[in-house]
Amino acid sequence: MERGEPAFRARQVWLWTARGATGYDEMTNVPAALRAALSEDVPFSTLAPEHQARARDGTVKVLFRTADGHPVEAVLMRYRDGRRSVCLSSQSGCPLTCTFCATGQMRFRRNLSASEILDQALHFRRVEPIDHCVFMGMGEPMLNIDEVVAAARQLPDIGVTPRRTTVSTVGWLPGLHRFVDEVEEPIRLALSLHSAEPALRSQLMPVNDLYPLDAVLAECRRYFELRRRKVFVEYVMLGGVNDRVEQARALAELLDRKIFKVNLIPYNPTGAFAGSSPKAIAAFEAELRRHGIPTTVRLTRGRDIAAACGQLAAAG
C-alpha cells in the first residue's frame, strides 16, 4: 500500500467492504491508526446516494452522483424465491439513443469506472446479501467493456458468481467481439434485439445501421460455441410495432433454438410507445414456442417507481 502498510491490508479492507461493512470503523482487524487515516483521506464510496424510491413489490431504485456530479441510477430487485438481483449502470446516460428507452433520451455524460460500477452493488450489499447481477442499467456495457469486466471480476467477493452475472448489449460489435474473445469466466450474455426486421430494428435502435443484426448474431453464435452457454434475447413488446404473430415467426426463423432463449419484456412506459396487450404477448410467446424457441415473459419489477427495464433516466 502507498502508506507503507503490508500489501495484505488492501485485501483486508476490500473484503470487509465486499461483505457489507458500512465504514472503515467496522474493520476490526485493521489497525485503528490506519482506519482513522483512511476515514480522513479516502472516501468510502465513489458515489453519493441522492434519492431512493421503493416500489410496491419491494424493488429499490437509488439515484447516485459521481464525485464530478454526474447522475447514475441502480436498482435492487427482490424476488419471492429469495433471489436478490442488482441492475447496474455502466455509463451515466447512453449515447446510443434507442427510441423505446428512457436512458437513451437523456444526455450522455461519460463511462463509469470499475469502482463506480462496483459501488452501486456495494450500496445494496450494505442493505442485504445479493446473489445476482445484470448489467442492464444506464449505458451500453460493450462501450465500456474494460471497466465492466473489471467490475464483474470483483463481484464474487460480494456474493455474485460469474454464472449469475449477465452483461447485456444492443449489439455494439467491437466490445462484443472482445467480450467473446477475452472473457474466460462464464458470464452470461444478453442481446437487446426487439425486431428481426432490419428496417424496423434500425428505426428502434440506430446502432443497427452501424452493426447489422446478422453480424451481431454471428458473434453470439461464436460465444455459444466457445462457452456452451445460451444467449438471452431481450425483446420489448411494443403495441402495434413489433408484436404481431408474423413478426414472432420471423424472429423464430432468425434464431437457433439451441443457442438462444427469448425473454419477452412488457413495455414499461417512457412516453414513446404503447405497450402490447396481454393477448398479443401471449400469442407472440405461443408462436415462438411453436417453433421450438425457449421463451419466457419477464416479470416486471419496479414499474411504479420508473425502475423497470428501459425506464432509468436520471435528471440533472
Image: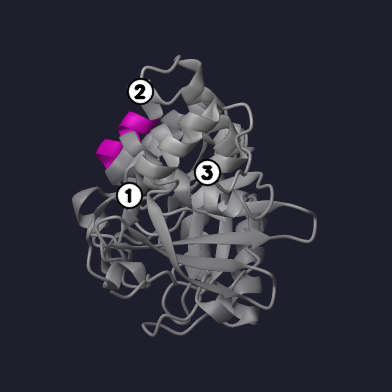
Q: Find the magenta span and give its range.
A: 173-179
Give me the C-alpha separation between circle 2 and circle 1.
51 Å
Q: In the structure shown, which secondary structural element does the residue marked by tag 2 occupy?
A: loop
Residue 162 visible? The answer is no
At a point 37% along the width and 49% down the height, the residue shown is 46
Q: Where is residue 95 in the image (x, y as percent from the top left)?
A: 23, 59
Please tell me which residue lies in front, 266 or 288.
Answer: 266
In the rendered view, does 276 fall on the left or right side of 20?
left
Residue 5 visible? The answer is yes
Q: Where is residue 100 in the image (x, y as percent from the top left)?
A: 37, 73
Mark 1: few/some/many CA within 10 Å (<14, 14-19, 20+):
many
Q: In the structure shown, which secondary structural element does the residue marked by tag 1 occupy?
A: helix
Residue topped by disc 1: 213
At a point 62% along the width and 69% down the height, the residue shown is 301
Residue topped by disc 2: 3
Up the image or down, 3 lies above or below 140; here it is above
Up the image or down, 219 lies above or below 108; here it is above
Please tell me which residue lies in front, 73 or 23.
Answer: 23
Q: Of the numbered discs in the image, which one, if any, rests on residue 234?
A: none
Q: Main secondary structure of the magenta part?
A: helix
Query: Do callouts 1 and 3 mark residues in contact (Cβ within 8 Å)?
Result: no
Mark 3: few/some/many CA within 10 Å (<14, 14-19, 20+):
many
Please tell me which residue lies in front, 312 or 72.
Answer: 72
Give me the C-alpha separation between circle 1 and circle 3.
20 Å
Residue topped by disc 3: 166
N-terminal of the two: label 2 or label 1? Answer: 2
In the rendered view, does 138 fall on the left or right side of 266?
left
Up the image or down, 248 lies above or below 155; here it is below
Amino acid type assigned to the residue bearing label 3 in the image: Thr
Which quadrant is home to the C terminus? Answer: bottom left
At a point 54% along the width and 46% down the height, the residue shown is 23
Q: Per the image, is 176 magenta?
A: yes
